[in-house]
Amino acid sequence: MAERLTRKQMADKYPNQWLGIRNITYKGREIESAEVVYTKKTASELGLFSLRGEDVQPLFTTPDMVFQLGAAGGINSGTEI
């Protein structure tokens, strides 16, 4: 059975992991809560589940809400060239 958690609870319970989530509730553009159906999977594995028709969305968690590949923006982010 899936476990329904808030976005913060997911990050706290499963830090720095890919999760497979479904039945997502949004608050504006942010995930408010979702059912966690997969843990300890790679992004590729979760993508294959989606391709096979399973209702699952991959989500990478970090406790401090930092993007997986680094900060958003570029070297000149916010500056005029």
Image: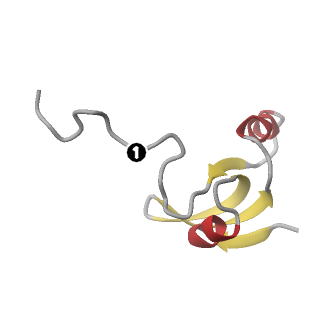
What's the coloring here? secondary structure
Please identify the residue farthest to the top as the structure is shown. Answer: 81
Please identify the residue farthest to the right as the structure is shown. Answer: 1
* Residue type for callout 1: Ala
The residue nearer to you, when weighing 25 against 48, is: 48
Residue 68 is drawn in which quadrant?
top right
Residue 48 is drawn in which quadrant?
top right
Task: Pick the quarter of the image with the C terminus.
Answer: top left
Taking the image as shown, residue 35 lies to the left or right of residue 29, namely: right
The residue located at (88%, 68%) in the rendering is 1
Q: Residues within 10 Å of mark 1 (few under 14, many from 20)?
A: few
Q: Residue 74 location in percent, x, y? A: 31, 34
Taking the image as shown, residue 71 lies to the left or right of residue 3, namely: left
For disc 1, the marked residue is: 71
Task: Give the vertical position of 18 relative to 46 (above or below).
Answer: below
Q: Residue 73 location in percent, x, y? A: 33, 39
Q: Residue 9 location in percent, x, y? A: 63, 73
The residue located at (74%, 36%) in the rendering is 47
Q: Element at badge 1?
A: loop
Task: Give the vertical position of 71 relative to 30 (above or below).
Answer: above
The residue located at (24%, 38%) in the rendering is 77
Q: How many marks?
A: 1
The residue located at (69%, 70%) in the rendering is 13
Taking the image as shown, residue 5 lies to the left or right of residue 74, namely: right
Q: Residue 57 location in percent, x, y? A: 69, 48
Task: Give the vertical position of 24 relative to 6 (above or below).
Answer: above
